[in-house]
Image (spheres, helix red, strand yellow):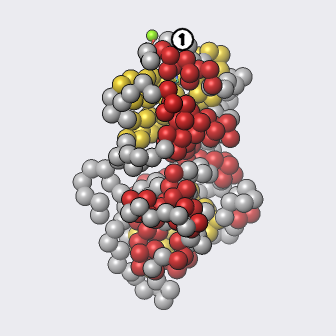
Amino acid sequence: MPEFELIGRIRARAAVRDDVILGIGDDAALLAPHAGQQLVATLDTLVSGVHFPVDTAAADIGWKSLAVNLSDLAAMGAEPAWALLALTLPEDDAAWLDAFLDGFLELAGEHRVALVGGDTTSGPLAISVQLSGFVPPGQALRRSDAKVGQRIWVTGTLGDAAAGLDARLSGASGSAETDWLIERLQRPQPRVQAGIALRGHGGAAIDISDGLLADLGHVCTASGVGADIHAHSLPTSEALAEWPPAQRMALQLGGGDDYELLFTLPAEVDASSLLPSGVRATAIGSINAGPALRVLDADAAEMTVRHRGYRHFGKTQ
Ligand code: ADP
Ligand code: MG
């Protein structure tokens, strides 16, 4: 099937929005930026065998390729609008493409994202999504806004996706708990509305893609602060609660792919009252003058942590 027929299948299913003057079909998309708003732009690539196991279902790849980008806009407090999709495909497989679009467009529909263009080439399977959105001037959430005395919060539960990957690679599945963990890996729920709700409260935010300690480390570096994390207060799902405690803790501190938000707020602000109903918020520690990022046990003694997160280049710590 020639490339333009694949593009035609995409075009036939892509939804539009009022601010899309010209979507898929010309040399470039023509878009109407929103007056008085700042444009927020992000791009993430998923490579087969690196970001997802090679036998991952096409619909799950489609979902995740958009979800990771939505998560970045969530961490900026932005409202998503337009996506560009670069597909590098090993074969001109229409059935694979249709299933990929099932997952991608399902999530796009949930967040009113219009797919407005892209590129289609042949090669080893890789997907890049460029996503744009909007935020009122000066209200974007930044990594550099953590301040001494603020509390550190996370949405949802931690470690589930890393446990799901572990289960996936070891071939374990079948129990409801394991399937739920694998679902957390393959179908992350980006915290878009939570990010928007956090605007204007004076804290920092980041999404947890590489692992809690790695991503909190980015916030601390950008803000020039340190942090204490209380290991016993990390939010744990029912499924992960069944895992051996040491293994569970390592996944919660160092495991990536949860796509929850980590954010800071002045100590007197309760995140639970800010976030949309149904989004769990847990205080897990506080910002201090630093410079260290410490993990404390239930007796407030510092713990030694070996695996601090995922890195593409150089050794994982
Ligand atoms: P050109 O050769 O001018 O770059 P293409 O043939 O690559 O044009 O693309 C034709 C149209 O299809 C463009 O509007 C482009 O944005 C869109 N398009 C191509 N690939 C994709 C894709 N994977 N997803 C969405 N739109 C795509
Ligand atoms: Mg052209």
Quarter, ligand 2: top left
Q: Residue at x 46, y 74 (%)?
A: 248
Give percent across and percent down for residue 3.
44, 17
- Identify the residue shown where x is 24% and y is 54%: 314
Q: Nearer the viewer, residue 142 or 122?
A: 122
Asked if the beta carbon under badge 1 is closer than 8 A to the nearest atom of ligand 1, the reply is yes
- x 43%, y 59%: residue: 168
User: With 111 as the anchor, is 298 left or right in this view?
Assistant: left
Instruction: Give the residue drawn at x 59%, y 49%.
Output: 190
Residue 291 falls in image quadrant: bottom left
Q: Is residue 169 left or right of residue 196?
A: left
- Element type at mark 1: loop
Across the whole image, how many numbered discs are drawn on residues?
A: 1
Q: Nearer the viewer, residue 57 or 123?
A: 57
- Per the image, the residue denoted by label 1 is 26
Q: Let me know if residue 214 appears in the view.
A: no
Answer few, some or many: residues within 10 Å of disc 1's Cα (few below 14, many 20 plus, some between 14 and 19).
few
